[in-house]
Image (spheres, rainbow, N blue to C red):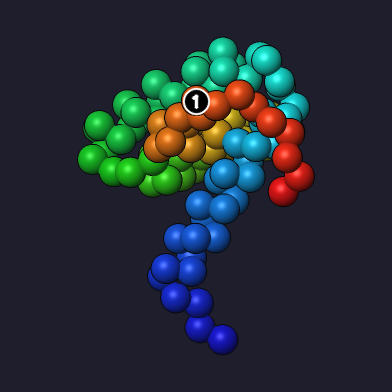
Amino acid sequence: MHTSQAEKVVRVAHTFYQARRNMMALWGDEYPKKVSEYTPYITGVMQKRNCDEIEAAKFLIDGMIERSKDASANAIMTAWIIAAAVEVAEPEEVEMELIPA
């Protein structure tokens, strides 16, 4: 079965939004402050590479993995980078509600 480009985009977006939702659930009230530490990296890469949030996140994640072999640290940093990319694309301005996915 062939996966269309549109389907790939939807799947990536779903994964990104799910990552943000998970980080919000884990960090609660601390989430806005913590994610704001990562959004400047996303916007900086977007400006320098003239790309969108997803490409900026991929660039940052690839670079991080190349430099660090610590799988646990890479996993949490990946989640924060993805959450930050979603925040840049569509900031969460409503009260966080823990809704099952």
- Considering only vertical position in the picture, is 7 above or below 23? below
Closer to the camera in the image, 37 or 71: 37
Q: Residues within 10 Å of mark 1 (few under 14, many from 20)?
A: few
Is residue 52 toward the left or the right of residue 65 in the image?
left
> Going by the picture, which residue comes out furthest to the bottom?
1
Quadrant of the image occupied by residue 29: top right
The residue sitting at 49% across, 18% down in the picture is: 36
The residue sitting at 48% across, 65% down in the picture is: 8
Q: Amino acid at mark 1?
A: Glu
Residue at numbered disc 1: 93
Quadrant of the image occupied by residue 40: top left
Closer to the camera in the image, 6 or 64: 6
How many numbered discs sit on the rendered protein? 1
The spot of residue 86 in percent (x, y) is: 48, 37
User: Can residue 83 be seen here?
Assistant: yes
The spot of residue 93 in percent (x, y) is: 50, 25
> In terms of secondary structure, where does tag 1 sit?
loop
User: Can residue 67 be seen here?
Assistant: no
| Image quarter of the N terminus | bottom right
The residue sitting at 63% across, 20% down in the picture is: 31
